[in-house]
Image (tube, helix red, strand yellow):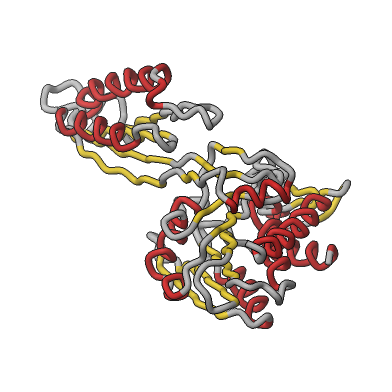
Amino acid sequence: MREKLIKLTKELINTNSVSSNSNKSIIEIFTRLFKINNFDIEEINYLDDNGEKKYNLVARKGHKSGGLAFLIHSDTVPLANNSQLNPYIEDGKLFGRGACDMKGPAAASILAGIEEDNLNYSLTYIITADEEIGCFGADFVVKNSKLLKEFPPKWGIATEPTELVPIYAHKGLCSISVEADGIAAHSSTSMGESANFKMIPFLYYISKLKEKYKNDKSYQNMEFNPPTNTLNLTISDLNCAPNVTPAKSICKICFRTMPQSKTDEIITDIKNKAAELGLSFSYLLLDSIHSDPESIFVKTCKKLTNREPSTVAYLTDACHFSKILTPIVLGPGSIKRAHTKGEYIEVDELYTGYKLYRKILRELSRI
C-alpha cells in the first residue's frame, strides 16, 4: 500500500490543477477511482468569473444519513516553476506542488476509504475547486449537491496538513472593499476632486480600530495564536500619476474572524463609517469553525492520534461545510511547507496519515 500511495500522490501532483486553470483532469482521476470502487458519483460544475469551467465531485458509498465525509480541495496555488509538476523523492521527502497541500493527504484519505468495505455508515468524499482563492467550490457544493441533501454526513475531516494534530477550530476571513470616487483633472487646475483625500478620514478610523482590536480582549479569542484578528489593509489609486487628481481610491481590508470575537459588530462598524463618509462598501465573509473539543468525534481523533486537539489561524473549505456537518482539520504534512517553492511531504508521515485515516474510519463504526 505504501507504494500505491506514493504512486497516486505523484499522479495527482503531475496533474496541473492551479486555481486559474480548469481542474477537469484531476477530477477525472478521482472519478475513476471512485467508480471502480462502487461509489455513487455526483458532479457539480460551474463557470468561474473568467469563464473557466470548474468541477466539483461528491462520491458516496452507503445509503444512510450521518457517517463521515472527507473534505478535499483539488486546486493548488500557482507553480513556483514548472518542475513542481514533476514529483520526486529525496531523503524520504516527496517534492512537488500540492505534495502536502493537499494532494498527499487527499491520496491517503481516498485509499484509506476505498480499502474499507465493512463500515456501518455512509462514507462520503467531497472534492472541490477554488479553495485556494476563496473556497468558491465548497460554497457551490453545499448549495447544490443532491447527494449531500439526500444523506447528509455527520462528521467531516478536511485533509489539510496539520502534522496529524486534530484541529477543532480555525479562524475565518472577512474581506472588505471600500471605495471613494473623485474627479480626474490636471493637478495644476482646481477642476479635480481627489478620491484619496476623501479616503483619508476612513483610513484614520481603521488605524484606530486596529489599536482597539489589538488591546481590547473582548475582540480576541485566547484559543488561537495569535488571539487577535490581525486587521490589515491595502490602498490603491490605480497607479494614478502624481500630476492628476485621482478619480478612484480603493481600500481593501481583511481580518481573521474567530468565534465569540464580535465579527458582526466589526463589519457593521466599518460599514457605517463608510456610509457616513459617502464611500461604497462591500464584503465577503468566510467564517471561522469551532467544533466542540469535548465531542465524541474530536475525542476519538485525539485518542487515535495521541495528540492534544488544537486550533489554527488559517481557514479551509470547512467554513462552508460546517453548515451541514461537524468538521475538524487533520492531515499529514506541515502547513509550513505548503505554498513554498520546495513544497514536500515526508513519505513516512504520508503513510502514517493513511493508516490513521483507516483507524478513524473503523473506530467511528463503533460509535
| Residue sticking out furthest to the front | 367
Residue 74 falls left or right of residue 231: right
Q: Quadrant of the C terminus?
A: bottom right
Residue plotted at (43% across, 27% down): 220
- Res 14 seen here: no
Closest to the observer, 20 or 213: 213
Determine whether 115 is above or below 351 in the image. Answer: below
Q: Residue at x 37, y 65 (%)?
A: 143
> Which quadrant of the figure has residue 18?
bottom right
Position of residue 310 measured from the top left corner of the image (x, y, whole percent): 61, 38
Residue 195 visible within the image: yes
Quadrant assignment for the N terminus: bottom right
Question: x, y percentage for residue 297?
Answer: 59, 53
Q: Nearer the viewer, residue 358 or 254?
A: 358
Which of 155/196 is in front?
155
Residue at 35 percent across and 19 percent down: it is 212
Q: Quadrant of residue 365?
A: bottom right
Residue 159 location (% of width, % of height)? 62, 54
Q: Measured along the vertical axis of the image, is residue 302 above or below residue 57?
A: above
Q: Residue at x 38, y 17 (%)?
A: 211
In the image, residue 168 above or below residue 150 = above
Q: Is residue 184 left or right of residue 317?
A: left
- Tally of numbered discs: 0
